[in-house]
Image (cartoon, rainbow, N blue to C red):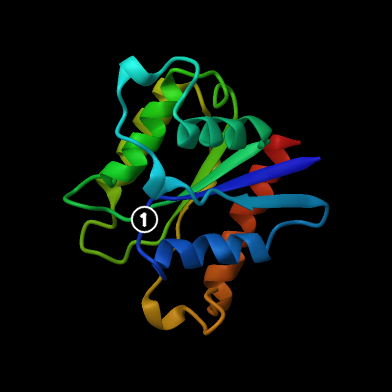
Amino acid sequence: MTVVLLIGGSVRSGSVNQAVLATAADLTPDGVTVRRYEGLAELPQFNPDLDAYPLPAPVEHLRNAIAEASALLFSTPEYAGTMPGALKTLLEWTVGGVEISHKPCGWINPSTGPTHAVATYATLRTVLGYTGAAVVPEACADVPITRDLIGHDGTITDAGARDAIGRVMRELVARAE
C-alpha cells in the first residue's frame, strides 16, 4: 500500500499551504492512502539530549508517521526569508532517525510574494539533503495560490492549479511505487 504523508509548514489555521495539501489529498491517485501530519505545533524544540529512546511522544509520533509513509509532500510558507522555525524543528528531529532516508519527497510552493519563497524552498532542499531524503525534482512545483482561489471546502478551485498539484501527486506516487 502506498501512503503519502502531507506535511504543512504552517501552524496557522486555514493557511494557503493547508489548502494546497487538502487539494493534493483530493487529487491523490486511486489506491493511494493520504495522511496529514497534524503534530507540527506540538513538537518540542530540537535538543540532541532528547534524541534518544524513549523519545518525547510528539517526536515518536512524527517518526512513526514518516516510517509508515511511502513518500512525503511538503507545502510551507516563507517567514523572514526562510522556512518557518516549526518546520525546521520537524526536520531537525528527522536527522537523528533513519525513517526519512531514501524516502521520495516533493513539495508545492504556493507563494505569490515578491521573492516567491525561493530561499525557503532552497533551504528545504538543503535540509532534506541532510536527512537523506530523496527529493524528486518532478514532484517539486511552484503553483502560486491566492486566497481567492480557495473554496469554501478549503481546497483550491482554479483548474490550472489543480492540474499542477495533481501532476505533482502522480509523480511522487510513481516514485514511491
* Residue pictured at 68% horizontal, 52% vertical: 34
* Residue 68 at least partly seen: yes
| 27 is higher (above) or lower (below) than 66 | below
| 64 is higher (above) or lower (below) than 130 | below
Of residue 52 and residue 155, the one placed in the foreground of this image is 52
Circle 1: element type: loop
Of residue 53 and residue 31, the one placed in the foreground of this image is 53
Image position, residue 65 (x, y; %):
60, 37
* Residue pictured at 58% horizontal, 34% vertical: 66
Q: Quadrant of residue 166?
A: bottom right
Compared across the picture, whether 88 is left or right of 39 comes to left
Q: Which residue is mark 1?
A: 10
* Residue pictured at 40% horizontal, 33% vertical: 91
Image position, residue 46 (x, y; %):
32, 28
Q: Tell which residue pokes out farthest to the left in this image.
A: 80
Q: The residue under label 1 is which amino acid type?
A: Ser
Image position, residue 11 (x, y; %):
36, 56
Q: Quadrant of residue 64?
A: top right
* Residue 135 at least partly seen: no
Image position, residue 116 (x, y; %):
28, 57
Of residue 121 and residue 47, the one placed in the foreground of this image is 47
**Quadrant location of the N terminus in the rendered image:** top right
Q: Quadrant of residue 22?
A: bottom right
**Quadrant location of the C terminus in the rendered image:** top right
Number of numbered callouts drawn: 1
Compared across the picture, whether 56 is left or right of 118 comes to right
* Residue pictured at 55% horizontal, 80% vertical: 157
Q: Residues within 10 Å of mark 1 (few under 14, many from 20)?
A: many
